[in-house]
């Protein structure tokens, strides 16, 4: 069995030692990943091969696209998925190359999007649809998985909420695993683990996260 991980920088292992693998199973040639990231540590503990499809800075649509692509693989696998902040916007250019814009970007595209097209309601609704799609697909293919998230707005219910949002939140809630009720970053902060200047938990936090999540994964396996 292979452990495959999907997500943004917190699954990729930004600010940790980085490894390179150019094997044929990778989604991109010469894919980078870190063996110190918590999903990689879990794979090592379970004696599983590890492939990371996480991409620093990406959005949830891109995460979903990679999950769908890998779900078509018939080889036995366990999926670890970390959903990212909902206000990231993924799109493809005319050459089908993925691009992502985030609120801090200063490009013309980003400034136009966040000024004229962006809304928190759309972010919540689309992200919830992405997550439900992944859950349904993985269950259909009988692929074991564990999901977590970085953005509390995914399950926030006070603002920008409709029956559609509420229904989707209730659907996905049983499938979402937290770090004692917190996101990985917030959990690492409360535990006083070292965090990089770019706000990424470092090796001690990932080691503790792997120990915590391994117990949840063993229940699934």
Image: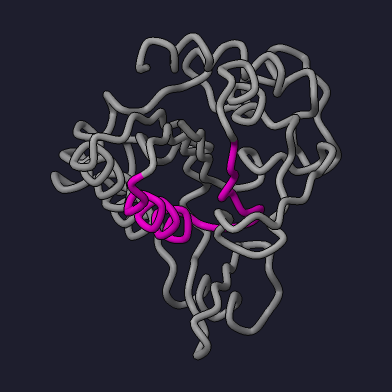
Numbered disc total: 0
**Residue at horizontal 73%, vertical 20%?**
205
Residue 195 lies in magenta, yes or no?
A: no
- Rendering coords of residue 165 (x, y %): 22, 45
Can you say which quadrant of the picture contains the N terminus? top left
- Rendering coords of residue 210 (x, y %): 62, 18
**Residue at horizontal 77%, vertical 14%?**
192
Q: Nearer the viewer, residue 21 or 104?
A: 21
Residue 65 lies in magenta, yes or no?
A: yes
- Rendering coords of residue 142 (x, y %): 24, 35
Vertical side of 195 occupied by 58: above or below: below
Can you say which quadrant of the picture contains the C terminus? top left
- Rendering coords of residue 169 (x, y %): 25, 36
Vertical side of 194 occupied by 109: above or below: below
**Residue at horizontal 49%, vertical 78%?**
92
* Residue span colored magenta: 50-74
Vertical side of 174 occupied by 96: above or below: below
Q: Nearer the viewer, residue 136 or 1?
A: 1
Question: On the picture, is 219 further left or further right than 92?
Answer: left
């Amino acid at each position: 069995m292979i452990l495959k991980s999907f997500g943004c920088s917190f699954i990729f292992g930004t600010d940790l030692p980085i490894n390179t693998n150019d094997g044929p199973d990778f989604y991109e040639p010469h894919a980078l990943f870190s063996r110190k990231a918590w999903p990689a540590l879990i794979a090592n503990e379970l004696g599983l091969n590890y492939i990371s499809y996480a991409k620093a800075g990406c959005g949830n649509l891109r995460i979903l696209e990679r999950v769908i692509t890998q779900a078509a693989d018939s080889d036995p696998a366990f999926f670890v998925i970390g959903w990212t902040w909902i206000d990231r916007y993924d799109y493809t250019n005319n050459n089908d190359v993925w691009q992502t814009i985030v609120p801090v970007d200063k490009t013309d595209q980003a400034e136009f999007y966040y000024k004229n097209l962006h809304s928190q309601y759309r972010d919540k609704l689309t992200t919830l649809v992405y997550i439900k799609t992944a859950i349904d697909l993985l269950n259909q293919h009988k692929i074991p998985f564990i999901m977590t998230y970085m953005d509390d707005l995914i399950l926030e219910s006070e603002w920008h909420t409709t029956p559609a949002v509420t229904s989707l939140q209730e659907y996905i809630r049983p499938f979402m695993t937290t770090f004692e009720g917190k996101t990985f970053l917030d959990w690492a902060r409360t535990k006083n683990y070292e965090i990089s200047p770019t706000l990424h938990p470092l090796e001690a936090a990932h080691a503790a996260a792997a120990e915590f999540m391994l117990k949840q994964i063993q229940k699934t396996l």
